[in-house]
Image (tube, grey):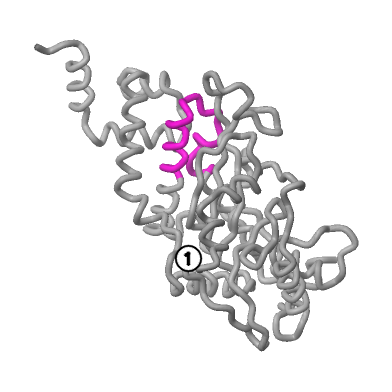
Amino acid sequence: PINSRSTYDAYRRSLPPGLKLSITLRHLACGDDYPSLSYNFRVAPNTISLIINEVCDAIKAEFAAEVIQCPTTTEEWTAIAEQFEKRWQFPHCCGALDGKHVAVTCPWNTGSEYRNYKGFFSIVLMALVDADYNFLWIDVGSDGSSNDASIYNGSELKEGLESPNNIFNLPEEKSLPGDDVPVPYYIVGDNAFGINKRLMNPFSIRNMEHHERIFNYRLCRSRRVVENAFGILAHKFRVLLRTMNQRPETCRKIITTCVILHNLIRLRYPATHNNLMDLEDQNQNVIPGAWRNDKVLLDVYHERARNTGAQEGRQIRRYLGHYFTSKAGSVPWQDKMIL
């Protein structure tokens, strides 16, 4: 016998795939709520909620493994490091790491679990980005009360990068161009993360010496790619700029789908975002990208108490600072940028 539930399921399955995709892309791109989508597409809001979940699952199943791949071979890491050195003059860098808040309504029966330091409820998107604004690795769904350090410390990325057995197959230590001192490969982050041989962060801004100021400029220049990647992502998928009122599980799916589509667009249409990202003129002055005109995703709270670094990492950072001020490692415009 056909009951109301089976009839409803049959109706939902009978909807054209193109219509389902259009509804989902409209929601991701514009952030339209379900009643608005219902009015535009003549589909009931409760059906739309199921459609968006279904399409996000399908996009993830089809494209996630293809477009979001954390490198696991030495050749892949080396290619990323060469890209950072060529574009941003920061050698041995294998990615830029940062986290952003995506606003959500307070999930049922969670108290202040998702409440962040800015006073609203959010889910955290933590990401590692390459020099071409592609997301290499993401962690989606940590509650808004978490901070960069705690999320990274509990992630498989940290476990892989800092594994004694080098399970990520990072390249062996190698001397920098024009020098003979072996230096390991690493990722870059801000002061929220503890420094070690696999993660470089800036010097403290107090009483900096010349080589420390140069290092901070060069590192922040390379870190700008992750900030731009988040900005481009939110500019294209404006649902991330609104307060998402779905369940946390659905919010995670939507955020993940946005990242997948971002990488897919970067892969197939690499020139699409050129007007959105920050650029540099011939004098290396920054030309702000169009994404900066929009509301932006907020940085994750930087909890200083967890920023404990390793001595080996500090030694490498100090060496890089001196290398960047040497004849072999300097770039012509860097001194004027720290005035």
**Residue 317, percent from left and from top:** 73, 70
Which residue is rendered at x = 31% and y = 45% of the image?
61
Relative to 27, say whether 38 is above or below: above
Q: In this view, does 61 lie above or below 25?
A: below
Decide if residue 73 is on the left or right side of residue 278. Answer: left
Q: State the quadrant of the N terminus.
A: top left
Magenta segment includes 251: yes
Q: In which quarter of the image is residue 172?
A: bottom right
- Residue 131, how many percent across, how many down? 54, 64
Q: In which quarter of the view is residue 76 placed?
A: bottom left
172 within the magenta span:
no
Residue of label 1: 168
In terms of depth relative to the viewer, which is nearer, 324 or 288? 324
Tell me which secondary structure the magenta stretch mostly adopts. helix
Which residue is drawn at the image coordinates 68% and 54% (left, top)? 193
Query: Which quadrant: the C terminus?
Result: bottom right
What segment is highlighted magenta in the picture?
234-258
Q: What residue is rendered at 81% in x and 67% in y?
A: 213
- Looking at this view, is 330 or 252 the one in front? 252
Where 281 falls versus 57 (above or below)? below
